Image (tube, rainbow, N blue to C red):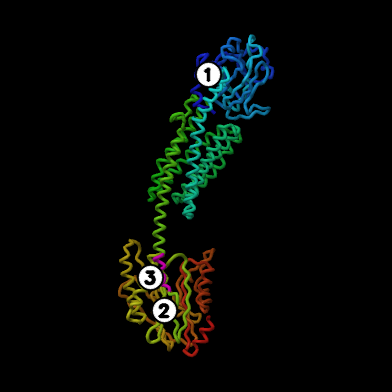
Amino acid sequence: MVLPGLAQTAAPAPSNVQSTVVLSAGWRFHIGDDPAWANPGFDDSSWPTIRLDKPLTEQGIDSYSGYAWYRLHLSPQLLAQAGQPPLNLLLANDASGELAVYLDGKERGHTRGMTASPAAYWTHPFLVEFSPTAPNGGLDVAIRGWVDGDSSSGALSRAYLGSHNAMQDRLDLFNSRIWGSYVLSMSLSGLLYFLVAVLGAVLFLAQGRHSEYLWMALLCVSLVARSVVELCGLQAALPTRMATTLDIWASFLFMAVTLEFILRFTGSKSRLPVRTLQAAALLIPIVPMLHFDVAYYAISLTAQLIFCVLVLAILYRSWRRGLPEAGVMLLPFFVAATGNSINAVLSYAASKGWIPASMATDRIYIGFVGFGLGFFTYQFFLVSLVAVIFYRFIRISEQEQRSSAELEAARSVQAMLIPTELPSTRSFSLDSAYLPINGVGGDFFQALPLKDDSMLIVVGDVSGKGLQAAMNASSLVGALRNELSHDPATVLKHLNQVMLGASLGSGSGGPASFATCLCARIYPSGQMTIANAGHLSPYRDGRELELAPDLPLGIVPNIQYEQATFQLKPGDRLIFLSDGVVEAANAKGELFGFERTQQVSHEPARFIAQTAQKFGQTDDITVVSLYFVPTQAAAPLLQSLQ
């Protein structure tokens, strides 16, 4: 891996600057490995001479992999020129290469990965201290180098000779450039990603139903993982091959997580292409592990291209569909994705020798701190992401506050629609059950005792869901309580006009609302007059009453509803219910239906409602039961119900 920030310091220098001798020329070089090449008396005159400050390929030597040796004889004059003993050799390179240093045939130091089974690490400059044993005879320096993979520059690119203080100063300069060029910017990136990940987790805890916050946090966690892996590789805490493998996995994990975030963020239905690319992203990192490097680069670039096009297409379609946040994310994502692709293309071209390695670098220095192109593109993307997520969070919070206020209002409306206590008279005993599917719906019922000891029962269901349906139902209930006539057909006629007015006054622009409704007046004698506006007929002792199916309320103005009369016998039970009972459906899509409803229609109201709910509730369930008994039998029956 090339260190462009350090390469800038490796230009040929004068032979002696502040007690420092730059050892660039005169090196003998040979590819291969033989322990005898470390001996001071070894004849290396047949080896080609090279310079360290130029690539090997520019000096007539092909790229190679594995071992190679460098040899240089330091004359007594050169040693004296370097300063007073003890002296130091400072060795460095621009790539992952391992070194072992021999002075007059004795090993005096080696890099971390130069073992019996060498492994490549990011090699940092290091010092070798020595005192010439025979200054009049000079010193033979032999360096055994090893590189993993094709190398055009070799394992050694710079060598300096000088006093301990001078070499230590130069080593500190090299290390500070590594920190300034890489460590600080990587650490800053990782910290920013971590903070945004924490932000995403906090937002998810605040609005747990919105999983896009969680996936944003995971997206940033994958970026933190990349930063940690790169820092570990840079500090030689991990072998280069392992760091590269982990970085590849982290990169494609980022791709898979980003796709899931975009899917949740936009609510897109493009699940098949997203899932396919996610599966590919988790499999592609296996390719380089099988040493198919050329295939990996081709597949990787193709996957990145498809990833960019797919995400941009989803964002664009969501923006056109009316999601402004998606439009805001288009440019930041395009910039970040393009920056990544440019880096990948340049790195691949440099690895193949198609372009100079210096062209693959993208460092921009602010002071002594170097930032890559990816740093700026990712931070632009990150800032935009945080801004959009905050905007969404605030918008959703406001919506939830409005929903909370609506829910509170709906509860007040619900108290009007569904009586908490039913009246009891000398002739009638009432029982009810109401099981809303969520929030407030359009079901309503009223039981109004009249002055002549008769009972007016009204059960209805307004079309639609939520607060609007409940408000329409409340209009009907309010009109019913102010109704002067208690004749069922007349009541329905007046409620029809109220429903028509409520539908026209809603101003929603949607389909007009309507309501089914059943109105029955039952006298102490057992006589019942009943009119039906498209509602389910009631059940009398397990049998459905036959009623004329007139139109629901709110469909046609000035409609005349047909009225029927029945005579109840002592002990008769009437069951009024909403369509939530009949339309309950199980997991197989099978309806509860009229047959099952008839089978349970002789049971108490709560039993009927709970049976339908357990079968599979799909709508609000309302059940009202009325027991008719002569006055003298009312008390024993009431006791049996308690």
Residue at 47% x, 85% y: name it. Answer: 628
In this image, 68 relative to 395: left or right? right
Which is nearer the N-term, disc 1 or disc 3? 1
Tell me the SS state at disc 1. Answer: loop
Calculate the distance from the C-alpha at mark 1 to the C-alpha at mark 2.
Answer: 99 Å
Question: Quarter of the image holding residue 83?
Answer: top right
Residue 476, compared with residue 357, is above or below; it is below
Residue 543, compared with residue 337, is above or below; it is below
In the rendering, at what x and y percent does residue 616 appear?
52, 66
Which residue carries the number 3 mark?
A: 473
Q: How would you rate the neighbour count of disc 2 (Cα within 10 Å): few for under 14, some for 14-19, many for 20 or more? A: many
**Type of the residue with mark 3:** Ala
Which label number is shown at residue 447? 2
Question: Quarter of the image holding residue 116?
Answer: top right
**Type of the residue with mark 1:** Asp
In the rendering, at what x and y percent does residue 280 appear?
54, 42
Is 148 in the magenta?
A: no
The prevailing secondary structure element of the residues shown in magenta is helix
Tell me the SS state at disc 2. Answer: strand
Which is nearer the N-term, disc 2 or disc 3? 2
Q: How would you rate the neighbour count of disc 1 (Cα within 10 Å): few for under 14, some for 14-19, many for 20 or more? A: some
Query: Quick one: 322 or 213, which is closer to the camera?
Result: 213
**Type of the residue with mark 2:** Ala
In this image, 162 relative to 381: left or right? right
Residue at 42% x, 67% y: name it. Answer: 411
Q: How would you rate the neighbour count of disc 3 (Cα within 10 Å): few for under 14, some for 14-19, many for 20 or more? A: many
Q: Are marks 1 and 3 in contact (CB under 8 Å)?
A: no
In the rendering, at what x and y percent does residue 422 appear?
44, 78
Query: Quick one: 628 or 552, which is closer to the camera?
Result: 628
Query: Quick one: 130 or 580, which is closer to the camera?
Result: 130
Which label number is shown at residue 53? 1
Magenta-drawn segment: 408-418
